[in-house]
Image: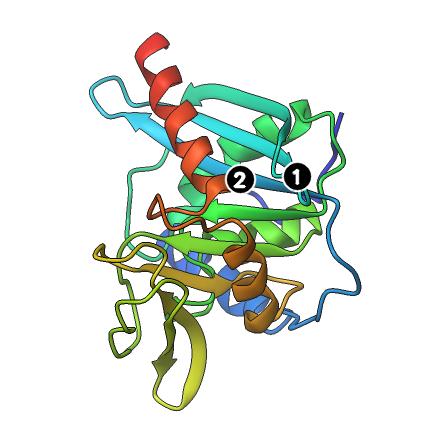
Amino acid sequence: MMTYRKIHPLEGLSFQEMTGIQKSLRTRICDTPLAKEPRFVSGVDVGYDTSRKRGVAVIITFDFKSREVVDTAYAVGDATLPYHPGFLAFRELPLFLKAWEKLETETDLLFFDGQGRIHPRRMGLATHAGFFVDRPTIGIAKNPFFGTYEEPENTLGSYRYVYDNEEKIGAVLRSKIGTKPVFVSAGNLITLEDALRITLHFVDGKYRLPMPTRLADSYTKQLRGEY
């Protein structure tokens, strides 16, 4: 069973308290270059049945070199906090951590379906989760949330940086020609350059989303129909 750090409470918090937690953790974010190529990489997605206020968190783990699936874990539970922009981590971390405890493979790095540093306080879901699991994390988002950027060229793998004023906080990446780009950002314990490199390893040009979050998203939708 995988364990995690209990950094702070995840329930019963006011938005003022959540903002304070984000501001405090922001000062501890680390831009750490990867020391070596990861052996195992996981994709994370959390989906909801809004009619029943139920959620499911999925973690799919891959062998980095072969890109083959080696482990899958999921958890189902109630969505206790409504969605509020900028505070997605407080909604999704409780379910993610339940699935994390079921994971059997010691993963080295995680992709999240959500933002990392592309966030007003640099504390998107991927960044926040990195403090709990103490692993490098990457945010892969489908839509813009914060910052300014120029559209990348319509060629596979092209990208432009996302900025908050002069600060580089992420990148907008063309992962499939003729399709909207995705937004890539470092979470914690990784640099933006490494996050882009690892992301491109899982981009094949056939799909918009890189493999880890694409398959996690697909499995989440399947489980939502069952639970």
Image height check: is 104 above or below 15?
A: above
> Outermost residue toward the top?
226
Q: Nearer the viewer, residue 128 or 45?
A: 45
Location of residue 64 in the rendering, given as x and y in whole percent from the top left corner: 67, 44
Location of residue 30 in the rendering, given as x and y in whole percent from the top left corner: 66, 70
Residue drawn at (74%, 56%), measured in percent from left and top? 37
Residue drawn at (23%, 25%), measured in percent from left and top? 50
Q: Nearer the viewer, residue 157 or 180?
A: 157
Look at the image and tell me in which quarter the C terminus lies.
top left
Give the class, few, some or many, for how many residues have Cα within 10 Å of label 1's Cα (few <14, many ≥20): few
140 lies left or right of 52 = right
Q: Which residue is mark 1?
A: 66
Q: Earlier in the sequence, mark 1 or mark 2?
A: 2
Q: Total marks drawn?
A: 2
Give the class, few, some or many, for how many residues have Cα within 10 Å of label 2's Cα (few <14, many ≥20): many
Q: Is residue 102 visible?
A: yes
Residue drawn at (58%, 58%), measured in percent from left and top? 198
Q: Which residue is mark 2?
A: 43
Image height check: is 80 above or below 132?
A: above
Q: Nearer the viewer, residue 217 or 145?
A: 217
> Outermost residue toward the bottom?
166
Location of residue 127 in the rendering, given as x and y in whole percent from the top left corner: 54, 58
Q: Is residue 7 visible?
A: no
Q: What's the amino acid at mark 2?
A: Gly
Query: Of circles 1 and 2, which is in front?
Result: 1
Look at the image and tell me in which quarter the N terminus lies.
top right
